[in-house]
Amino acid sequence: RKEVEQDPGPFNVPEGATVAFNCTYSNSASQSFFWYRQDCRKEPKLLMSVYSSGNEDGRFTAQLNRASQYISLLIRDSKLSDSATYLCVVINFGNEKLTFGTGTRLTIIP
Amino acid sequence: DAGVIQSPRHEVTEMGQEVTLRCKPISGHDYLFWYRQTMMRGLELLIYFNNNVPIDDSGMPEDRFSAKMPNASFSTLKIQPSEPRDSAVYFCASSFEYGDRTGATGELFFGEGSRLTVL
């Protein structure tokens, strides 16, 4: 089983809709969680951290479910510019490596 | 401010040739990472350095791959000899603070990548 797993998609969503996707992790010692965004043929960039209590940044909401070992990303009122691949990232306790999921591809349709 | 700078941006070479990829991290960052990205495997960590010292190279696929960081502002990833299966985008990233330590932001700053094609 991969350490970090994501549904590769693609998710094709109409503009203005709400979309959510999950990421599961296998190591219960995983300590820190993040969502990165990668535009086509560009480098990944940090979108937001995921806190235990859940957190929101504008139209984006990230949540962590430790019991079921997954994190989620919700995008409300989606915009064309949200089209990208969203990468889930996990850091395990005592380990300095960031482990990336393979990403979920999102396309917002006009 | 300059970000992470990688060169070359694109490289096409023939099987068996030596390939050298270069990276200049953001000034003041003391961690440097080399990742490889393919459609099938996503982003894979190859090696990372802390204060120019290699910490974990367990992701380096085989002896054909080597990485060095002779000083705080420069690193190289070398493939010799190259093979078609090495074709990928190679990213360099740097960070000043990450991991599970207090105050970690988990933010890596990536370069634009080096797209390698081995024929």
Image (tube, coloured by chain):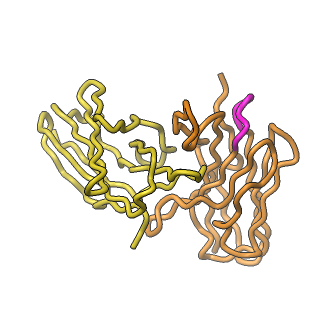
Chain colours: A yellow, B orange
Horizontal placement of A42 versus B45: left or right?
A: left
Q: Quick one: quadrant of the N terminus of chain B? A: top right
Q: Nearer the viewer, residue A18 or A41?
A: A18
Magenta span: predominant SS is loop
- Look at the image and say whether residue B108 sits in the magenta stretch: no
- Residue beneath the point at 13% across and 42% down: A14
Q: Describe residue B104's horizontal placement relative to residue A21 as left or right.
A: right
Q: B102 and A73: which one is in front? A: B102
Q: In percent of the image, x 74 and y 29: which residue is there?
A: B28
In the image, is residue B29 part of the stretch drawn in magenta? yes
At horizontal 63% and vertical 74% (from top left) the residue drawn is: B119
* Image quadrant where residue A3 sits: bottom left
Image side of residue B70 versus residue A20, left or right: right
Residue B21 image offset from top left, x and y in percent: 74, 54
Instruction: Please provide percent x and percent y for residue A56.
Output: 27, 28
The span picked out in magenta is B25-31
Quarter holding residue A53: top left
The residue closer to the viewer here, B101 or B11, is B101
